[in-house]
Amino acid sequence: MTQQDPAKRQDFSKPQLLVLVGPTAVGKTGLSLKLAAAWNAEIISGDSMQVYRGMDIGTAKATKEERQLVPHHMIDIHNPDHPFSVAEFQETVRQLILDIHSRGKLPFIVGGTGLYVESVCYDYQFSESGSDEPFREAQQQFAEQFGAEALLEKLRLVDPESAERLHPNDQRRIIRALELFHLTGERLSERLKVQKKESPYELCIVGLTMDRALLYKRIEERVELMLQEGLVAEVKQLVNQGYGKPYISMQGLGYKEIIDFMEGKTNWEETVVLLKRDTRRFAKRQLSWFRHMKDIQWVDMDGQANSDAQYDAVHAIIADKFTIER
């Protein structure tokens, strides 16, 4: 085995953590399964919506068959009425990382929710800045009266950077960002920038990217496939179980649009167009977030001839980081 450059030498006092990020539809799931098998890893979902039971198609969870090939965590751990937060994600995943290491396996975060993934990778502290329930209720009423885009525009006026990163459907985080500014005069984007970027782990972060036109084509194909696989039926079942728009989970991409269709607010053609458009915008925001993260080594998925070449490119990055004579 070749001795590694001293500048790349690992800090063995820190546990190793492998991370694979990228926009929706770029090909994370298939690649992660092959990498997990090669590196004796267990996968931790880095998606804020895959924690919810019954939300399978719209969140593009790994199938049950795929989850039998490699252990997966942070999937199906809550009912859709649970107000899942980034702080809970951070605390739970950090415990998971210790548990996975204790069994001699490599923890492997795979996902596209930038803040959630970054909160684990680095020493983020989530301090409470208080709350103003009447303010929150007023913002919720404003959104109901004037629409999600109008609420996001309110945030854009005081914190344009956070507004760029948040989806209009993500009303809970939009309202929280507005509330933070209301209570403290501090922008969420500024708070995130001053968080310590030191990691408690020996990190290897790989980011997947792709030509924008090709990615958008894959996104549109994925939306069509989700609809064919029964996304509407999935949303109807959730609504029939009592999980409607007021819940954070049902504000997720794909779910809100289908509920609007079910309520007659859009026709089918409009629904499909909106779903594809919103997913493209979501992918753009994901890429914007990841490009601001440090330590990422990028792999161009359309720049590789085939899936084997893509795997080899990522595998080489991991080997360069984690393989060393002890």
Image (cartoon, grey):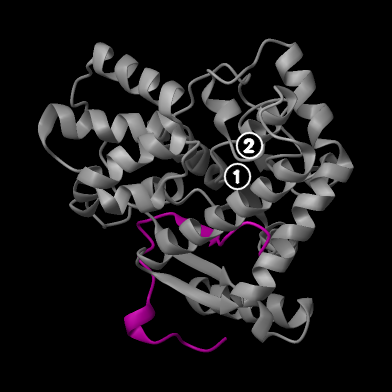
Question: Residue 23 location, x and y as percent?
Answer: 57, 60
Point out the image quarter for the N terminus. Answer: bottom right
At label 2, the amino acid type is Gln
Task: Name the quadrant containing residue 177.
Answer: top left
Q: Earlier in the sequence, mark 1 or mark 2?
A: 1
Crowd around label 2: few <14 · some 14–19 · many ≥20 (10 Å): many
Whether residue 297 is situated above or below residue 225 in the rendered picture: below
> Circle 2 is placed at which residue position?
50
Instruction: Say which quarter of the image contains residue 74.
Output: top right
User: Which residue in the protein does label 1 denote?
Assistant: 45
Q: Is residue 38 visible?
A: no
Q: Residues within 10 Å of mark 1 (few under 14, many from 20)?
A: many
Which numbered disc, 1 or 2, marks the residue closer to the eye?
Answer: 2
Which numbered disc covers residue 59? none
User: Magenta region: which residues?
Assistant: 1-26
In this view, the residue farthest toward the left is 185
Q: Is residue 224 magenta?
A: no
Secondary structure beneath dot 1 equals strand
- State the image quarter where residue 265 is shown: top right
Q: Is residue 94 left or right of residue 198?
A: right
| Magenta span contains residue 7 | yes
Give the residue displayed 20% in from the left and 44% down from the top: 158
Task: State whether residue 134 is above or below residue 173.
Answer: above
Asked whether the residues under the numbered discs 1 and 2 touch, taking CB atoms below 8 Å apart as contact, a structural biologist would say yes
* Image location (x, y in percent) of residue 109: 55, 51
